[in-house]
Image (tube, helix red, strand yellow):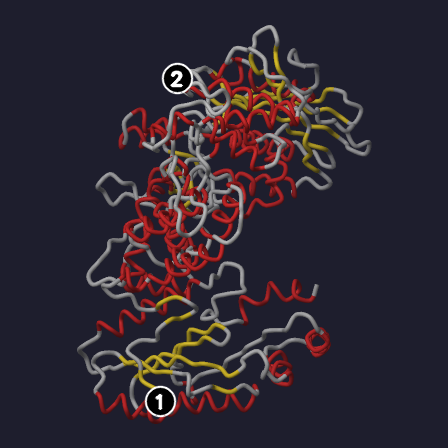
Amino acid sequence: MVANRMKPLLEGIISESQSAFLPGRLISDNILIASEVGHYLRRKQLGQVRWAALKLDMAKAYDRMGWSFVRDMLMGLGFDAKWVQLVMMCAQTVRILRLRVLFMVAGWPGGHRPFRICFFADDSLLFFKANLQETLEVKKCLSVYESFSGQAVNFHKSSVSFSRNTHVGTRELISGSLAVTQADDFGKYLGLPSVVGRTRRAVFAYVEQKLRQRFGSWNKRLLSKAGKEVLLKSVAQAMPTYTMSIFLLSVSLCVSLERLMNRYWWGRNSEDSGIHWLAWDRMCKPKKFGGMGFKRLHEFNLALLGKQGWRLLTNPGSLMARVFKARYFPTTSFYEAILGGNPSYVWRSIMASQDLLKSGCRRRIGNGRSTLVNNGQSLLVSDLIDAHTGSWNGDYLHQVFNSRDAMLISQLPVSMDYEDMWYWEGDLRGCYSVKDGYRRLGFINSQPSSVWNNVWKLQVPPKWKVFLWRALSNILPSLDNLINRRVDLINICPSCGVSCSRRRSGLVVQQVLLVIYKDKFVVCSMSFGPLGTRRFGRVACWHHICLFGVMRRSGRLGWNASSGGLVRAVGTPQQLLLSPPHAAATFHCYVDAGFHGSHHAAAYGFVVLDGDSSFLAAANGPLACPYDPLLAEAMAMSEALSWLKDNGYSGGRIYTDSLVLVSGLNYASSFRTYFGYILLSCNRLVSALPGTFVSFINRDANHVAHSLSKHVTAIAGPITLEGYTSVFY
């Protein structure tokens, strides 16, 4: 509770150079800044101004912090004495979780410019000009910090590096004054290399080495394919994630890592890699498309880097974004940025994801004052909006664009109360996520098979599912498949000892009979059903029997004797219960939206009843909305609320059959799409109707409003009926 009360204040009292433990800040920001500064120090060979970077190592940083220093800092920041006492009581009595509180105050006396700090717990970087005066001031500030906080700097493990234009004598003077060693760069910062040269494969070789060591320890475990799947997805493919979120790994390194994973999946130990029955790229397909859902590391790397590009695009006020903007795109945004001259490797890595961001980023138009029309002219979008009506200027649109584009633009809602912003297409909130980016890179233009969905949804042990997947993919070590793989075997059936092309593999028979025996089924003559034999060859019949046995055990599928195939057991869906309207409501308003014709013209409809469910009013009309059902529902809600406000209603209940709309009203500010500022508009209108609430009902209870929105008169123009029962009611 104490932490939650302080949470809103932390943004203003913690320096922006502290990039973790706060909403909107990531630990990766300091790594990116440190890498960029390291690249600057390496390439700066000329000029009179010379720079130094001091990497500090704090001796037992979490054990030497003085509680009196923490108390004095809280009092100095303006917290009330009672609050400070409560915080210190919680901090000093905790036994399990150590409180990690670190403050650092650094600056020049007399109002001079402070030196720069990249600070994270006990891994800190200080940047200052490489001269004796600033060096002594840095040492003085560190001494003051040590005396007040109780912490101590371990100068024996600390190091200092310099820009290339710093003379040797100056380097020795500064390092001697600080009593630290010199280094070519500041090495690893927060676990990652701060400077990446031309030998990138050697720099990131530690990723492959750690993975080899992990596989070496796993090879001693006797795990099934299902157990290996869990280890590969939860551990092996997660190990390089931290590095891949900052740097672009080479394609050859990604291939080597995938080769290690593939060898572990199919092998039995570290010496025997086994037969690789399926290519890795096919195993990386989603499970609903017949794969195992493993990640393609290069595409996953680009999706992770897309997160950094998205933050540069949508959070330009952060310290990291300001540093990169000043260096690479001072007059534009990241969307129009170019690689530039002599870029650092972190910038090259982020730019590798720019095409991914461009494919999914869209511009949400608010007042149009910060967005240019991409027609070769210096024309702002705000010039296309009528300032008096707050809507699109239709005549001007048809002058600038062709008729089709003008129609599509006119369907976009605009609002002069909001700024333009970027949003991610395909996400409800309009925010980029690594999952969405990875899916966009690996988009499969086909429909998933219901067979695979049924297999992976079975309520059976995971190893059974993997066995079924291998059987349906025809990658079991059957006699036919082993011979096709040029394994030296005699083509004789192990069951009957007869050499016949129609006999099945003994391994498949044993596996199938085991499943059927546990389920007490008898193998009998049956057709192959919908799976067929053309795809699965000589083992198709046994695959089908195995699938039948496992599905019967799970209770998900049954056998249809008349058709000789597998049928899905369909249950009765659960219906949402409609709670009766609140008795104290002065009115009840039912709202819905609909689309008409092949052009998907949007329309709204709502009906208003009094507290006794007697008819008061009904209305419908067109909406300027693209083909987006959720956005249409929100705009219909906004139309109904506006009408209720203009007619003096209050203290009622408003009902919609969109559960996403009702839940989104509580988090309207988190949406970046057009849906977001329609929600904000609805919230303002609801607050103007005292005692009014929005509730969810199912579609059947909202059929009147639905009929109004789908009526042919809805797209002709707004119609309102009051005082008598409507023909639609």
Helix, strand or loop under label 1: helix
Bin the neighbour count of mark 2 within 10 Å (Cα to Cα): few under 14, some 14-19, many 20 and up: few
Residue at the far left in the pictured view: 46
**Residue 272 vertical placement versus 275 (above, below):** below
Taking the spot 41% from the left edge, 19% from the top edge, the residue there is: 499
Residue 97 occupies which quadrant of the picture?
Answer: bottom right
User: Looking at the rendering, which quadrant does residue 581 occupy?
Assistant: top right
Instruction: Looking at this view, name the residue that lies furthest to the top.
Output: 562
Q: Is residue 432 among what the camera can see?
A: no
Please provide percent x and percent y for residue 223: 53, 46
**Residue 160 place in picture, x, y as percent:** 34, 82
Which circle, 2 or 1, is nearer the viewer? 2
Q: Quadrant of the N terminus?
A: bottom right
> Which of 446 and 221 lies nearest the eye of the viewer?
221
Residue type at mark 2?
A: Ser
The vertical placement of 46 against 131, above or below, is above
CA gap, disc 2 to disc 1?
Answer: 85 Å
- Outermost residue, right side: 583
For residue 594, say whether it is visible.
yes
Identify the mark nearer the N-term, 2 or 1. Answer: 1
Q: Nearer the viewer, residue 323 or 198?
A: 198
Q: Residue under circle 2?
A: 501
Describe the element under mark 2 as helix, strand or loop. Answer: loop
Q: Which mark is residue 532?
A: none
Mark 1 residue type:
Thr
Tag 2 and tag 1, C-beta contact below 8 Å: no
Question: Label 1 belongs to which residue?
Answer: 135
